[in-house]
Amino acid sequence: MGLFNTYFMGGFECSTKRRNDGTRLDLLAATRHDRYACEDYQALQSHGVGTVRDGIRWHLIEQKPKHYDWGSFLPMLRAAQITQTQVIWDLCHYGVPDHIDIWSTRFPDQFARFAAEVARVVRDETDTTPFYCPVNEISFWAWAGGDMELFDPCTTRRGMELKKQLVRAAIMAIHAIRDVDARARMVLVDPVIHVTTRSAHLRAEAAHAQNAQYEAWDMLQGSVHPELGGSADCLDIVGVNFYSDNQWFLRGPTIKPDHPLYRPFRDMLAETFARYQRPMIVAETGAEGDLRAPWLRYVCDEVWAATQNGVPVEGLCIYPITDYPGWVDQRHCPCGLLGPADEAGAREIYTPLAEELACQQQRFSSIHDDVRELANAALSSNEQ
């Protein structure tokens, strides 16, 4: 048996960021998943998906310092229990409460305290091993919020500073959670990217941009900036996010999958595993419209090839698993297996993706034990 109940997972878009115009997003509310969590989990179970990524909305739970209202979380937690759905809970998906200053020296402690309170609730409500993603996509958040002003904290030229702050907070949260519940497992999620150039004088810059994808994971394991408190045990399960726009020319356009310089995803998985020797999952992948099924097929082909070459990829998460309103303009993004919810919580199924998922589930049905053996071998080697 693998780490997770099912190899294929569904991810619920749970961002709670503030955009640069001040608007607070709450994608769990916008997709009505917060209202229909039980129905959504049941729908995924009917498609053989028993493991999901989902979110906890810190800004709703701690609206006043050290005062925790679990009304937005307990119904979802209990829905997971009722449906026997295994959840990887995102504790901070780009959003913090309004009263908290992300730049403050107190921020890591504030987040760690919140994480410990979540762990107590989950420990007291459940009897299975909990999984957490402490801070989602540290590297992307540092770039988007620290360099590009796309969302909170909406600054420029502070990306590395924000990355260190988020890593410090994640490390403290990991220790705080484990102090409450030693069973807890951590999934550390960031995008994998490929940046290249056809200009000889830009090759060093392109290499630097590509290597930045590893900085947060390196900090978490303490191999760089050890003053942040990182250690090998903080880097538990590596979650890699991969979409069609994760490869681009430096200072140029996206590299399309049919381009000769497009890097096979299997090679990116192998490079990441070689660097960290940790169990891995594809924590996010997906596409919009008619590309949904072909994209899943491509990613599964690459993951299958990687596992055959000794890379222990322990799961693959379709993300988002429901359609959602776009971050910037609220446009309808047709990306999920499940469409918008009606007043009874029912969602239309996107049949081509459902059919492709079923084919891939059959293909990967025997992979759990093989991948677990690879992961255990890697862990043993890493500990020696």
Image (tube, rainbow, N blue to C red):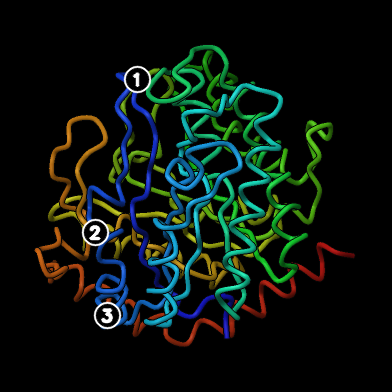
Question: On the image, which quarter does residue 213 sit in?
Answer: top right
User: Which structural element holds mark 1?
Assistant: loop
Q: Position of residue 97 (x, y in %)?
A: 48, 34
Q: Which amino acid does label 1 sit on?
A: Asn
How far apart in space, not on screen, are marks 1 and 2 (Cα)? 25 Å
For image coordinates 85% across by 64% down, the residue present is 383
Tell me whether circle 1 and circle 2 mark residues in contact (CB < 8 Å).
no
Tell me the mark number nearer the camera, choosing from 1 and 3.
1
User: Which structural element holds mark 3?
Assistant: loop
In the displayed structure, would residue 361 be above or below residue 170?
below
Seen from the viewer's position, the closer of residues 351 and 15 is 15
Screen quadrant of the C terminus: bottom right
Seen from the viewer's position, the closer of residues 40 and 232 is 40
Q: Where is residue 100 in the image (x, y as percent from the top left)?
A: 55, 29
The mark that comes first in sequence, 1 or 3, is: 1
Question: On the image, which quarter does residue 47 sit in?
Answer: bottom left
* Left or right placement of residue 106 versus residue 341 in this view: right
Question: On the image, which quarter does residue 6 sit in?
Answer: bottom left
Give the label on residue 47, or none: 3
Q: Which amino acid does label 2 sit on?
A: Thr
Give the label on residue 322, or none: 2
Tell me the mark number nearer the camera, choosing from 1 and 2.
1
Instruction: Please count the marks in the image.
Output: 3
Screen quadrant of the N terminus: bottom right
* Left or right placement of residue 163 versus residue 253 in this view: right
The mark that comes first in sequence, 1 or 2, is: 1
